[in-house]
Image (cartoon, rainbow, N blue to C red):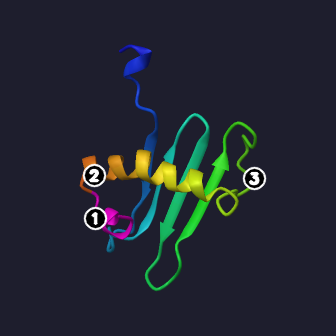
Amino acid sequence: MCIRDRPSSQVYFGIPVDRPEWGRRGVRTARYTLVINKIPDEPDEVVLHDNIDDPYQLWNIAAENPDTVRELIEQELIPWLRRLHDPWIRHVE
């Protein structure tokens, strides 16, 4: 596999056994880690970490970086979820 064949991100899940359409989904790129937690009847929890400036992931910078959050959702997270046919995607698109 050539370096150019590597994906630009990795996806990860935290899926409740009885509610696969809820829970956590996230992506990690070389620069950022994004996590969105969906809980019924509660606002989404959005966490964004800068893996370069904050390698220990101590600060949530999501509120200050809405464009980065939106870009990661649209360009990384949604394509992963579509490929995997994840029911959680209905809550993001």
Q: Is residue 60 above or below residue 53?
A: below
The mark closer to the camera, 3 or 2, is: 2
What stretch of residues is rendered in magenta? 86-93
Q: Is residue 53 left or right of residue 90?
A: right
User: Which residue carries the number 1 mark?
Assistant: 87
- Badge 3 density bin: few <14, some 14–19, many ≥20, Cα 10 Å: few
Q: Residue furthest bottom?
A: 41
60, 67: nearer the viewer: 67
Q: Is residue 92 above or below residue 49?
A: below
Gap between marks 3 and 1, in whole Å?
Answer: 30 Å
Q: Is residue 64 above or below residue 53?
A: below
The mark closer to the camera, 2 or 1, is: 2
78, 54: nearer the viewer: 78
Amino acid type of the residue tagged 2 in the rendering: Arg
- Residue occupying the point 39% across, 69% down: 16
User: Which residue carries the number 2 mark?
Assistant: 82
Residue 23 shown in magenta: no
